[in-house]
Amino acid sequence: MDEVQLLKTAIKQYGLNPSSLIVDKVIQSNNWHGDLHFKILVDNKYFSARFIGEKRYESDIFIKLSDEVLTEQIRFCNYLLNSGIPFMKHMSTIHGESFSTICLEDKDWKFVLFEWIKGDHLTHCTETIARTFGAFARKIHNISSKFDTSVFPQESHSKGHHEFYNLLCTHASSSRISPLTTDLLKSYLNKIEYHKDRAKSTSHDFIIQSDLNPLNILWNQSEQIIGVVDFESITYTDRVEGLAWLVKWYSRTHGIGSHEMSPILAKSVLQGYGADEILIPRDFERLPSLLWLTGCLNWNFTAKTIELIKNKDDALLKEHLIKYLKRLNPKISS
């Protein structure tokens, strides 16, 4: 695929000059949803240019990014920006459309354009960073609670946890692995059941949240947040479930890929968020199990486990399970 030609075709619909296009950077070329994402320079201005494919995930667990959903996500981006959140500025086409549709080599893409925001990613967190981010997340949640939409489904993450668990059980039941590794897998499934039960709730405080992981947050040299740069994961979440992801990401002292989590940083996130002001005792009871599930029953873990079971790779499956069983969550209390 000629990506430069694809970009030139796309930016014409935004009134930009294709002959001035320079591809400055390819972003996350090995992503698992197949999007094409670039930092480009056009008419002496930098942009975030993203092509979104029709079939993005192998599993139907994830919400389909339909035209209606994408339009609503962009509407929410603009709502945050207009409410004082430093979200990247969305660019409409010359016809006022939220995104354009491009077809090249019999493949359809949705093309979304934003102005580029310059800043730094801070993935090695400190107490100050964790507390600052917690306060920022609370501000976003307060603002997003006033956003009215009938497009995003109000669903608990427990639905996804249940589907991941069922997938694992199905493949485990037909696996051809050693008895020792089979017992290890059963032990992991039992641990999932324990945390699923502790994390469930009959009452949810739904809010809208985007993907606020450290790679989507930009900071300046004074450790102030100056930009939010991702949009495609925007949907409803239960407040406590959303907080679990934020605590997971911002309690790491050794970067986003680290499995080590700091209890001190976890509490700093919650202090910055003002969790004591808004959460009830039952929320704090759920939070540790939700935190475990975000780290140990996410799609990356589930897909890798299924792959190893299918390949009958006993040694690697055992190593994989032991690594995740050793993950320790920070102690969280009000």
Image (cartoon, rainbow, N blue to C red):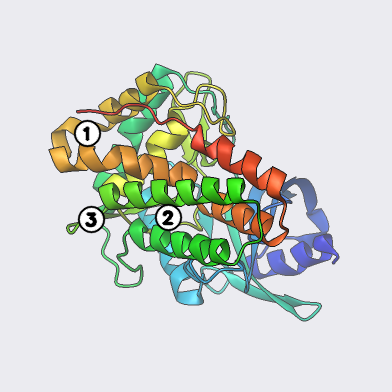
Q: Amino acid at mark 2?
A: Cys
Q: How dense is the environment of label 2, judged by Cα within 10 Å: few (below 14), some, or many (20 and up)?
A: many
Q: Residue at x 63, y 43 (%)?
A: 318
Q: Amino acid at mark 3?
A: Lys
Q: Which residue is mark 1?
A: 275
Can you see residue 323? yes
Would residue 276 be found to the left or right of residue 19 on screen?
left
Picture quadrant where residue 10 is located: bottom right
Q: Which residue is mark 3?
A: 146
- Alpha-carbon span between mark 1 and mark 3: 19 Å
Q: How dense is the environment of label 3, judged by Cα within 10 Å: few (below 14), some, or many (20 and up)?
A: few
The percent position of residue 76, horizontal first and vertical second, equals 38, 59
Q: Are marks 2 and 1 in contact (CB under 8 Å)?
A: no
Q: Amino acid at mark 1?
A: Ala
Question: How many labels, in total?
Answer: 3
Q: Are marks 3 and 2 in contact (CB under 8 Å)?
A: no
The residue nearer to you, when weighing 316 against 89, is 316
Can you see residue 74? no
Q: Which numbered disc covers residue 80? A: none
Q: Which numbered disc covers residue 77? A: 2
Query: Quick one: label 3 or label 2, which is nearer the N terminus?
Result: 2
- Alpha-carbon span between mark 2 and mark 1: 25 Å
The residue nearer to you, when weighing 277 against 118, is 277
The residue nearer to you, when weighing 65 against 218, is 65
Q: Residue at x 51, y 21 (%)?
A: 253
Q: Are marks 1 and 3 in contact (CB under 8 Å)?
A: no
